[in-house]
Image: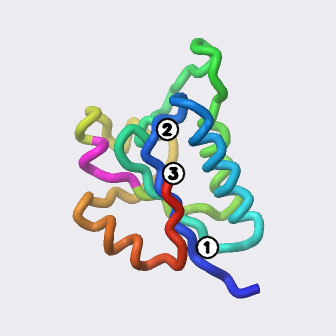
Amino acid sequence: MAMKSYLFVLRSASHSGCAVQEMLDIILTTAAFEQQVALVLLDDAVFALKANQQPEKYEVKDTAAIFKALEIYDVNDIYVESESLQQYGLTVADLSLPVEIIKRSEIASLMKEYDIVFPG
């Protein structure tokens, strides 16, 4: 099977429903089949990587642990939109994983680099 490149786009906060959890399951499954997988976080999704979350306080699933598992599956290309970080007053230092910052104006070009773009 030929390797394809996948870019997964997350826009929702982790604790806003099951969409992020389902997307993470798809990402890990895709990566398990040794496909090239990258992730871009926009809008509310930037909160998914915020360090020191306490989901148990709100009785929601801890997706931070799943995000940390991305490295095990060789998902190392994680992009975060700079404008989204700025909008919420976050910096790279506030995030729990190493990321590459990308400007909103560069996202269309990034998407063209991948065979399949999976919106979520």
Main secondary structure type of the part rendered in magenta: helix
Q: Is residue 84 magenta?
A: yes
- For the N terminus, give its image quadrant: bottom right
> Could you tell me which residue is drawn at 40 percent across and 77 percent down?
112
Q: CA–CA distance between discs 3 and 1?
A: 18 Å
Disc 1 packing (10 Å; few <14; some 14–19; many ≥20): some
Q: CA–CA distance between discs 2 and 3?
A: 13 Å
Residue type at mark 3 is: Gly
- x, y percentage for residue 32? 76, 64
Q: How many marks?
A: 3
Q: Which residues are magenta?
A: 80-85
Q: Mark 1 highlights which residue? A: 36
- x, y percentage for residue 47? 43, 35
Contact? badges 1 and 2 (CB < 8 Å): no
- x, y percentage for residue 9? 47, 56
Q: Which mark is residue 48?
A: 2
Q: Which image quadrant for residue 103? A: bottom left
Relative to 41, 108 lies left or right: left
- x, y percentage for residue 14? 53, 35
Residue type at mark 1 is: Gln
Could you say which is closer to the camera, residue 57 or residue 43?
A: 43
Relative to 7, 69 lies left or right: right
Q: Which mark is residue 120?
A: 3
> Could you tell me which residue is drawn at 53 percent across and 79 percent down?
115
